[in-house]
Amino acid sequence: MGKEAKTNAMRMLDKAKISYEVIQYECDEFIDGLHTAEITGAPVEQSFKTLVMQGKSKQYYVFVLPIAEEVQLKTAAKVVGEKSVEMIPVKDITKVTGYVRGGCTPLGMKKQFPTVIHESARQYEKIYISGGRIGMTIVVNPLQLAELVRAEFADITEKDQNN
């Protein structure tokens, strides 16, 4: 078996001596998290997507949330101390993060942006996130991930508003 090319995310985990697993799958273009979980066999509730948003102040923020849920913009903005936040245009993802759509991970972006991980991640020993390129998933402990990227945990999804 050939040596796999490491992504920035993997290098960052290695440097911090955090153990992780890598799941690779065949995929040539962006597919959503639900399809990725289906292909890899990852549990949907433990699979998280990474969204990059920009606040009214022009600061960028990273939100990591369950793949089957949508971010609640008002709540997300409040958590990071902004009046509002909005998704960055797809065409700007690589310029801002260094990653392509579908390969975006909270680890090893061009710059470390304030990061919020959905609080449901805390209940799992491991979560599944993008590995830094399309066709790669990293399985990592959410508490170690949060410590590494200096993230906070918060309730930032749509369904939380309807209780």
Image (spheres, rainbow, N blue to C red):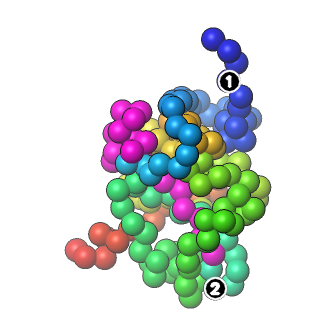
Residue at the spot of label 1: 4
Residue sitting at 37 percent across and 48 percent down? Answer: 34
Report the front residue among 150 and 30.
Answer: 30
Residue sitting at 62 percent across and 34 percent down? Answer: 18
Residue at the spot of label 2: 56
Q: Residue 37: give x, y in percent of width and height.
A: 39, 41
Label ID, residue 141: none
Report the front residue among 3 and 59.
Answer: 3
Q: Residue 122: give x, y in percent of width and height.
A: 42, 50
Is the C-beta separation of discs 1 and 2 under 8 Å? no
Residue furthest front as drawn: 28
Figure quadrant of the C terminus: bottom left
Residue sitting at 62 percent across and 80 percent down? Answer: 55
Q: Specify the quadrant of the image occupied by residue 90.
A: bottom right
Q: Residue 62: give x, y in percent of width and height.
A: 59, 63
Q: Nearer the viewer, mark 1 or mark 2?
A: 1
Q: Element under label 2?
A: loop
Figure quadrant of the N terminus: top right
Q: Is residue 102 magenta?
A: no
Q: Is residue 66 above or below residue 78?
A: above
Q: Earlier in the sequence, mark 1 or mark 2?
A: 1
Q: Element under label 1?
A: loop
- Say how many tags the image has: 2
> Is 139 displayed left or right of 10 in the figure?
left
Q: Is residue 24 visible?
A: yes
Q: Residue 91: give x, y in percent of width and height.
A: 66, 65
Specify start and end residues of the magenta stretch as a single range. 35-54
Identity, as a three-letter code, of the amino acid under mark 1: Glu
Q: Is residue 53 magenta?
A: yes
